[in-house]
Image (tube, grey):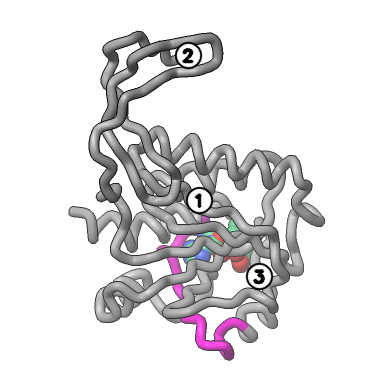
Amino acid sequence: MLRVTPGSTVRAFDGNGNEADGIVVAVESGRVLVELDKVREGGLEATIAVTIAVALLKGDKLSDVVRHCTELGAKEFAPILAKRRDVPGLSGNKLDRLRRVAREAAKQCGRAVVPEVFEPVDLAALQWSGIALVAHPHAQGSLADTQREAASKAHEAITIITGPEGGFTQEEVGELESRGALGVRLGARVLRAETAPVALLAALLVPEAL
Ligand code: SAM
């Protein structure tokens, strides 16, 4: 556990994009009193707003997706119900846990914004603005094509859509593509369902931060 003592310098954030440096003036049971300096806008947000639309996964794998994608700069998470999903739904407790994971990950990596985690929606009801990318191993579009497309539409929102361990059905991919989503292939190997969104997000956001 991290211990703070009077005189320690800290950085506080409100989860909505504001942050401030401060000095701890008192530590009482369950309470830390901080004197804050000027409040400013946090400067670590990505210029591209990326939504991670990820299929429900078994066990705690969604937590890993939320943790890593928060560190990499995702704006929000839209869990999706795909036909071959590994679990039927997301309990209230699991949703709370995902939101806690997003908060902790934002804190750990210094972001002043905590990404939202929405209630799951059917894949057919998923809405997006800007570009949508559907990741599937047999897609025509390569990652390089996708990076070029994203770069040419700088500052547009991007939604990354990745499937369950059993993958999307052909009908699901066809339906998404008919709504304008672009298929993307992440190399020759098949990635785990929890790896794919992290890999695609890193490919889009890490180069813009360099
Ligand atoms: N046999 C399944 C299929 O053909 O889709 C494999 C599913 S994979 C374990 C789980 C999810 O990760 C896929 O639905 C896709 O979204 C993503 N994925 C894994 N490897 C990928 C790759 N090489 N290219 C694009 N997406 C990939």
Is the shortest distance between ligand 1 and the CB of mark 3 under 8 Å? Answer: yes
Residue 195, label in figure: 1
* Residue that numbered label 2 is attached to: 1
Q: Position of residue 185 (x, y in %)?
A: 45, 70
Q: Quadrant of residue 163?
A: bottom right
Residue at 27 percent across and 20 percent down: it is 9
N-terminal of the pair, mark 1 or mark 3, is: 3
Q: Position of residue 129 (x, y in %)?
A: 48, 79
Is the shortest distance between ligand 1 and the CB of mark 2 under 8 Å? Answer: no
Above-or-below relation of 154 to 103: below
What residue span does the magenta drawing correspond to? 176-191
Check disc 2 and give the amino acid type: Met
Q: Quadrant of residue 74?
A: bottom left
Foreground disc of the pair 2, 3: 2
Q: Determine the quadrant in which ligand 1 lies.
A: bottom right
Check disc 3 and give the amino acid type: Phe
User: Does the segment drawn in magenta span residue 73?
Assistant: no
N-terminal of the pair, mark 1 or mark 2, is: 2
User: Does the segment drawn in magenta span residue 188?
Assistant: yes
- The Cα atoms of the two marked residues, 2 and 3, are separated by 42 Å
Residue 168, label in figure: 3
- The Cα atoms of the two marked residues, 1 and 3, are separated by 15 Å
Is the shortest distance between ligand 1 and the CB of mark 1 under 8 Å? Answer: yes
Residue at 71 percent across and 46 percent down: it is 58
